[in-house]
Amino acid sequence: MSLIKDGEILFAGHAERYSKQKNDWYNNKEIILDALNYGTPTHIAYYEKPQLKRSRLILKGGSGDWKPNIPLDLPVKYFKHHYSHAAAGYYTSSFKDAVIVVLDSIGEYNTSTIWSGEENKIKLKYKQNYPVSFGLFYSAFTQLIGLMPNQEEYIMMGMAAYGDKDKYYRKVNEYFPSIHSQKYNFHRGITDWGWVTEQDKFDIAAAVQFVYELRLAEFMNMAKFITGKNKLVFMGGCALNSSANTMLWRLFNDVWIMPNPGDAGSSLGAAAALYGKHIKWETPYLGYDLGGKYPVNEIVEGILKDKIVAVATGRAEYGPRALGNRSILADPRDPSIKDKVNLIKQREPFRPFAPVIMEECASKWFDMNFASPYMQYTVKCLQPEKIPSVVHADGTSRVQTVNRHQHKDLWRVLNKFYLQTGVPVLLNTSLNIKGQPLLNDEKDIYEWEKTYNFKIIR
Ligand SMILES: [Fe+2]
């Protein structure tokens, strides 16, 4: 749920952080009340067209008794699913003139769309409809290797670094041979693969990621060709694939991915679509407010002494990544810190941890000539021996860059650590109880401290 006024974002949050149910699709009383703390809405904008969606659900063999989740009794305007994605991206970008690409599993019918953004107008230039879908392809293979589709795609992406892509490249490619065709409707999953062993899973993940990137590059080149534009806005759940996103900087002069590009960020898109103009994007810290002053000194002292701290303060991040306000921060120089953090997070040992770095130092430590303030790009680490705990098996890291404007106090934390150690990098991972959404409020802090017997700095 998002609340905007005169082009300013007053609140943007996630229902899951209030209900504590991961990927919760439904608004709840708590998030509504929190949003109302920031203003009183006059209109509601909704991110899908109910009629259209129902007709597709019926076509697919469902009952079609689906209803939109409208929280308050106010005039409602509905926008198409992909249009909401496009608006969320374009209207929060700094671009007047851009090509907008939306790739997800499925909207009402659209699965892949290309739009032009010019002088605040968003116009459709190309569409691909269900069942050919980048998202459904990726999710079907996620399910094939034993993970949860529409939820654990990021785990498959992490597994790709451990696999041999060549082993299954040809076979996987047959399932998605061109951007206009796929072997069959992936909504029913992969039905004709056969037996999948444990090592197969990593090799399949590597091949799927590789084929996805090939098709993505083809699609992006088509988008560039159709619109003649060289600034890209990329949205939809597929824009969460940080390994694939990096190539976009080679194809376009500038790239904007709104930090919450999946359906969880569509409320902001619908609101912006109703406003019909660019809105001010200044910060991703737009959710529940814990208040307090950022505990810069306590964090640095804690990391130097204990190697690992947990911090929760200020407003919650909008989007899937912890960007410093609900984070575990740790010393990236210590190779054993990965195991210690994993012990707290209780997650698969192959999953990588991300680094946060002072923006001015980023190109010395990572192969990048762009900023990555929202952990959206995976790049090669140039000094892996110095920060082993934040480098993945394939030598890459999903980097968050921080400058003074973006989060002054997190930048100060990094700068102080840098002055003490010569390393301007920390490990940054989300603060959550295993299987639960990112920490949100005081109640979560209490639960987390009790569960892990670890004090959170606030
Ligand atoms: Fe979507």
Image (cartoon, grey):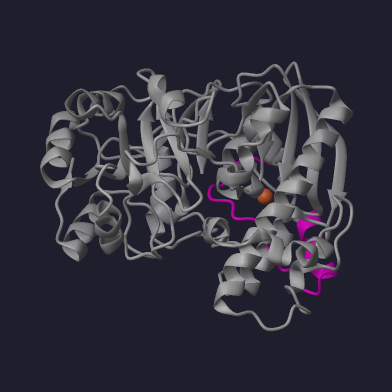
Q: In the rendered structure, does residue 64 fall within the stretch colored magenta?
A: yes
Between 198 and 234, which is closer to the camera in this rendering? 198
Describe residue 11's horizontal placement relative to residue 120 as left or right.
left
Does residue 218 lie above or below 100 as drawn?
A: below
Q: Specify whether residue 419 is in view.
A: yes
Residue 450 lies in quadrant: bottom left
Give x and y (percent) for residue 134: 74, 54
Horizontal side of 145 relative to 217 (left or right) equals left
Q: Is residue 307 highlighted in magenta? A: no
Task: Tell me where residue 10 sits by quadrant.
Answer: top left
Which is nearer the eye, 50 or 61? Answer: 61
User: Which residue lies at the image location 35% right of the left edge and 18% below the top edge?
Assistant: 404
What is the count of numbered marks?
0
For the C terminus, give its image quadrant.
top left
Location of residue 383 in the rendering, given as x and y in whole percent from the top left corner: 39, 35
- Is residue 64 something one can see in this rendering? no
Percent position of residue 429, x then y: 35, 48
Give the farthest residue toward the front: 385
Tell which of 195 and 187 is nearer to you.
195
Which residue is pictured at 40% across the width and 39% down the height? Answer: 317
Residue name at image x 17 percent, y 34 percent: 300
User: Can you name the residue that lies furthest to the bottom here?
Assistant: 195
- 289 to 168, vertically: above or below: above
Q: What secondary structure is the stretch in magenta mostly built from?
A: loop
Q: In this orientation, which residue lies closer to the viewer: 134 or 435?
A: 134
Q: Is residue 292 left or right of residue 77?
A: left
Where residue 104 appears, as percent x and y from the top left, is 70, 50
Residue range (magenta): 52-77
